[in-house]
Amino acid sequence: MVALEYILLIVFSYMIGNISWARTISKIKHSDITKSGSGNPGSMNMLRTYGAKAGFLTLILDTVKGIVPSLCGMILFEKTGLNADIGLYVAGLSVIVGHMWPVVYKFKGGKGVACALGVFIVANPLCLAIAFLIGFLYIWFFDYGSVASLFIIAFMTIVQGTIYGKYYANDKSTLLVINILLFAIFFVIWFAHRSNIVRLLLGKENKANLQKSFKSKLSSKKKEEVKIEYKEEKSELKSEFRKLKAEYRKSVREKKKELRSQYKSINKQLKKSNADLMANELKNEKVKYVQTSFDLEHALPTHENEQANKQPDTINKATSKSKNCF
């Protein structure tokens, strides 16, 4: 029954290692990390390809992936009366192997550094923090992630081996098993970095571009801040423009109203002046008509008198002719 529990622990740890957070995050970004950069589904390639945020997220998740099985191994071995440190490294080695050679991805995985960090966090968090700080500073100033990774693994292997050598000085068999497991972790990780070691010797190793990633992140953050400020200023200008537009329309309406009233008054005055003008013209026409009528009245009797004067002359001539006849 105990042997079955150990086998289940190894299988469980190995399958946990098969979870590839780099692939998952790159799929969320609609890409494939195995076809980008160095092709390695690890935090360093994620850093180079997608930036600091994606790189550190992958590092944290892969580290947690190493912590969980290691804790489970310690608890299981301690409950069954075996050495907890051996349980830690059995589970740790299994999860690292599962990360490096995952069966679900046709045995094409990462290089196991982040998972090893999770194992060493459980084993000795203080020493790991020191090693990680040194490795981070090396990457920051010299920009070679592979060197920092190899240094951290070598440093933790030596430190833990020294500590266990003193702690298990009287238990040689336990010390031997722990050292074998420690060396196995060291060996598989360095073996996975063999191509990086060759490129380092040839001077062709890929750089981590950590400073560049942070600078680009800061510049993008500044750009976002500028965009936000621009949007705020734009909204303020729009609101001011709307106010000015409303005031302009109001003033135009008032001006139109004023002009309309002026037009009405002028039109009224024009109508009144036209009426007065027409009245004057009618008056003048009336005066002319009266004058013409008066002239006609005075001209008609003169004509009648002339006719009357002509009639007696005609009568006298007729009378004289009649007298001659008699």
Image (cartoon, rainbow, N blue to C red):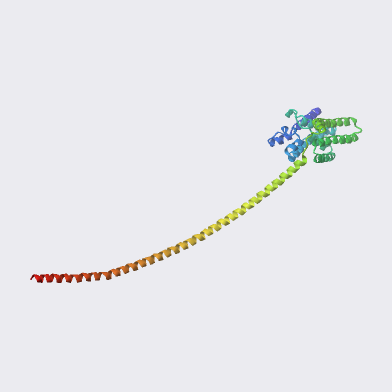
- Asked where in the image residue 54 lies, by quadrant, the reply is top right
Q: Position of residue 183 (x, y in %)?
A: 85, 31
Q: Residue at x 77, y 40 (%)?
A: 210
- Asked where in the image residue 35 lies, by quadrant, the reply is top right
Residue farthest toward the left in the current orientation of the protein: 326
Q: Position of residue 305 (x, y in %)?
A: 22, 71
- On the question of residue 259 being in view, the answer is yes
Seen in the picture, residue 279 relative to 15 is either above or below; the reply is: below
Residue farthest toward the front in the current orientation of the protein: 324
212 or 67, which lies in front?
212
95 or 247, which lies in front?
247
Q: Is residue 317 left or right of residue 144?
A: left
Q: Position of residue 117 (x, y in %)?
A: 81, 36
Seen in the picture, residue 124 relative to 319 is either above or below; the reply is: above
Q: Residue at x 22, y 70 (%)?
A: 306
Q: Position of residue 212 (x, y in %)?
A: 76, 41
Q: Is residue 222 left or right of residue 184?
A: left
Q: Residue at x 36, y 67 (%)?
A: 284
